[in-house]
Each structure stands twice: as C-alpha cells, then as structure tokens.
Amino acid sequence: MNNAPKPAPPKKSPVVPALIFAVLVIIAAIGYKRLKSASPEPPSAPPPAADATPSVPAPSPAAQSPEQPQETGAAAESPAPVPSVPPPPSAPPAAVADPKDLVSILATLTGKEPVTPEQARNWKDSLQQLIRQGAGSVPAIQQFLAQNLDANFAGVSGADALGYNSLRSAMLDALAQIGGAESTQAMLQILQSSIYPTDIATLAKTLDAQSPGQYQQAILDAVRQQLNMSGMDQLGGANVLPLFQVLAGEAANGANVSADLAQYAEKWPYYSAIALATLPDGAGVPSLTQIAQGTVPGNQAAAAQALAELAPQNTDALNTLLSLAKSGQLSDAALSQLAPYLGGREYQLGPPQNPAAGGYLTFHMAGGNEDFSAYDAGGTLTQSQISQRISIIDQLLQAIPATDSATQDALQQQRNSLSGRLKH
C-alpha cells in the first residue's frame, strides 16, 4: 500500500475574482448610460391655471442671442426664458352705430339754440358715419324726411361750422353722396311727399346730375303739385322761388313749361314774368304778350318790363311794346317804368348772382312773398347795342302820346344816358 502523501491541490489566485467583478461593473455602467440616453424627455410642465399670470414663452432658437449656446444633443438644457412685459390686448373693433340712432343725434340740433364747437363736431361726425354706412342708412334717412320735419340753422350762432343751413339739406346731401339705386328710389319718393320747395330744387339738381333728363317728368310733377298746394295756402306761406327756378332750369333742358308759368302769373306775377323771359328761343313772349295786354290774369307792368328786356333781341317783343304804347293798353305809370329795362336792366330770379360786381337792386313783393333782383347791364353794352337801344326808345317816344309827360320824361332821360356812352 502506497502511503505516500498525495500532493495538495493548487490554490486559486485572489486576483481573478476581482478582475471579473471589475469587468461586470464596467459593462453594467455602459448599459445604464445607453439606457438613460435613449429614454424620452420628461413631459413639459402643465399649463398655468386660468387665473395665473401668463408667462412669456421661451424664444425660439432662431431668436436666441449669440451668447446663448444652441442646444446640441439630448444633454443640453433649455435656456431660461427672458422675462418681458406682455403686450396689451388689442382693442375690440368699434361698434357700428345704428343709422336710426345717428339720425336721432342729428335731430338734437333744433336751430333754436346756439351750437357749441363740441356739438358741431359730434353732429358732423354722426353725419359722416351715416354716409359711410351707405345703402344701410337710406331707410332711416327716408323715414325722417317723410315726416316733413326740419331744423333751420340759418343765422344760428355757431351753426356755420355744420356746413349746412338746415337739417333737411344735410339729409338730402347724404342721400346724394350715398348714391345707388336705393338712394335714387328714396329721392323719387321724397319728391312726391315733400312740402318744402327747397327739397324739390335740391333733388332736381341731384337727379339731373345723375341721369340727365331721365327724371324730368317726375320733377315737373313735383313742382306742379307744390305750386298747386301753395296756391291753396297749404305750404304755410313758404317762398316758392325754388320751384320757379326749377321750371326755368328744366326749360333749358328742353321741357315746355310756358303754360305752367303763365298759369301762376296772377299769384306770383314777377316770378312768372322773369321765368317766362328766360325761356329759350323767346318761347315765353306769347304768354308775356297776353299778360301785358290784359287778356289773361297777371301783372301787366311786370310782363311789359320783361318784354322791354327782350325787345332788343326779339322782334315780337318790340312790336308788342309799340302796340301797347299806341293803343293805350298800358297805364302811364306802367309805361314810365319801362325805361331802365330798355337801357339794359335785367331781372333775375332770387338774390343777385354776383353781388360783388355792383349795380344790383333787390326787390320783395309781400303779396306773393316774392324775392328777386335786377342787374344794370348797361355798362357792358357794346356801341352797336347802345345805338340799337336808342333807336327803340325813339320809336316808343313817337308812339306814346305827347300828353303822357311822365313816360316821355323817363324815356328821354334814359336816351340821354345811353347817348353819353357813345363814342363820337
């Protein structure tokens, strides 16, 4: 039996386990780092509560200053937001005023009290708002005008700043500026319902400018309606001068209004005679002749003076004057008043057209509430025109009886005045 001792097993070195442990630690660290870099970013903070003060969002990378590093990779942190004052909220758009409310504001000025600068500014601003709303304002304007109400601003302290002499004139001008089919239809309806002669004149001018001749019949119907109403004292004594001016204007545009003018020669003798004298191509001479002869109602003196204006250019007018002088159909007083008109005086409807020129006379006839003027055009006559008028006066001097000393003297004085302007 071999009792030799067996060799002892070799001892394990302690370095090996330590080395293995170190390797495992390194592997675990690498795996942890990769896992962390691959994990998603934590969710952003929830939005602030509704009553919290809003914060300014962080500027985008393109808006960052050069001193702020750009984020590269997943490890970079977002820069802290730069605090700033948030902009004020934008003002809401101004509410559009109701046209009826704007009309009510305009109607607050009654023309009975002075107008302050602030009132004038608010009034003009309301009118402009009404116009800017266009067709939407037409019903409100028409509704007001249909009531036949007005406020007269003429002579009111501070009212010059308004730019209109009455509330109705402002409303009618608003319709004209708005334009369009709705506005035109409203104007045509106002023509039929208005009791203001100035309305007819304003609307006629606007409609004729928009569509020449298209609404002439509607305009003439409105004039005739108002003249009939005034003839029956249904217009409150309103001055009908604008209506005669419209008739004269429409006659210039081709309308035949001789019968209309002659019809009212008794109530408004000077308006009628002056308008008849302005008709194109002497169309008013037959009616003036009948009035001067007394065969139809009217003022003989007014008609004869109109014929004297026309005599240098119209043979029929001259022959009528000579006939009236020979027959004695005109009174001596009426004949004596012809001299200034043979010398160049001319009647005009309404106030002087050019007061600064001088040589104007103004007249008012209380009976028919007539206002008109006359201009002495003798200073503008040519030498041949002066000679022609002297010849007419000589013919009348021969036709008038010598016993009519007042007329003889008046005509002779006018002849001497004209002769003094002749160059010898």
Image: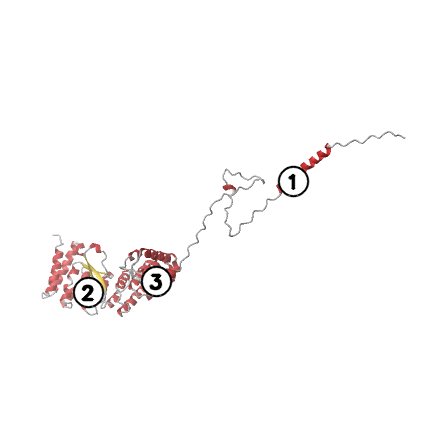
Direction top: furthest residue: 4
Task: From the top left corner, tell me how far across and down residue 59 is, in percent.
Answer: 51, 43
Looking at the rendered image, the disc whose residue lies closer to the viewer, 3 or 1, is 1
Here the colouring is: secondary structure
Q: Is residue 178 above or below residue 326?
A: above
| Residue type (three-letter) at the residue carrying disc 3 | Met
For disc 1, the marked residue is 32
The first of marks 3 and 2 along the sequence is 3
In-image side of 370 versus 101 (left or right): left
Task: From the top left corner, tell me how far across and down residue 273 is, in percent.
Answer: 22, 64
The first of marks 2 and 1 along the sequence is 1
The answer to the question of whether label 3 and label 2 lie on touching residues, with beta carbons closer than 8 A, is no
Residue positioned 34% across, 65% down in the render:
146
In-image side of 272 versus 211 (left or right): left
Task: From the top left corner, tell me how far across and down residue 256 is, in percent.
Answer: 27, 64
The answer to the question of whether label 2 and label 1 lie on touching residues, with beta carbons closer than 8 A, is no
Direction right: furthest residue: 1
Tell me the SS state at disc 2.
helix
For disc 3, the marked residue is 187
Figure quadrant of the N terminus: top right
| Residue type (three-letter) at the residue carrying disc 2 | Ala
The first of marks 3 and 1 along the sequence is 1
Q: Quadrant of residue 270?
A: bottom left
Tell me the SS state at disc 3.
helix
| Residue type (three-letter) at the residue carrying disc 1 | Tyr
In-image side of 83 versus 159 (left or right): right
For disc 2, the marked residue is 302
Q: Nearer the viewer, residue 80 or 67?
A: 80
